[in-house]
Amino acid sequence: MKTKLTLTVRKSVIDSAKKLAKRRKVSVSQLFEEAFSNEELTPIKTESQRAAQRLIERLSKAKSIETQGNDKDLLKEHVSRKFA
């Protein structure tokens, strides 16, 4: 459940937080939540970093596929078909 929180901080801190949030394409609330969601402080990630992390997690769970032949032969075959 989300709850509103009112903080009293210097205007310069608010401006810095807004700029950082804009650069990372997240809200100020998201910055705050990420900074304090874990017991140990972790660096705040950008949307791209979070997307990359999700992709890595999905790929690590994916089954590997069987290929016919080795990579070098497959590349040669692809190039010969492409430029034939």
Image: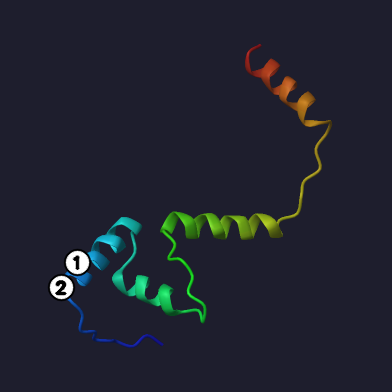
**Distance between the alpha carbons at the discs numbered 1 and 2:** 6 Å
- The C terminus lies in which quarter of the figure? top right
Task: From the image, tell me which residue sits under label 1.
Answer: 15
Point out which mark residue 11 bears: 2
Q: In this rendering, would 51 be left or right of 66?
A: left
Q: Looking at the picture, does residue 37 appear above or below residue 66? A: below
Q: Quadrant of the N terminus?
A: bottom left
Identify the image quadrant of residue 57. bottom right
Percent of width and height locating residue 20:
29, 61
Query: Is the residue under label 2 in contact with that under label 1 (CB below 8 Å)?
Result: yes
Instruction: Give the number of callouts.
Output: 2
Residue at the image point whose x is 63% and y is 13% from the top: 83
Question: Under tag 2, what secondary structure?
Answer: helix
User: In the drawing, what numbered circle is on residue 46?
Assistant: none
Residue 32, x across and y down, in percent? 35, 75
Using the rendered view, name the quadrant where residue 28 is placed.
bottom left
The amino acid pointed to by label 2 is Lys
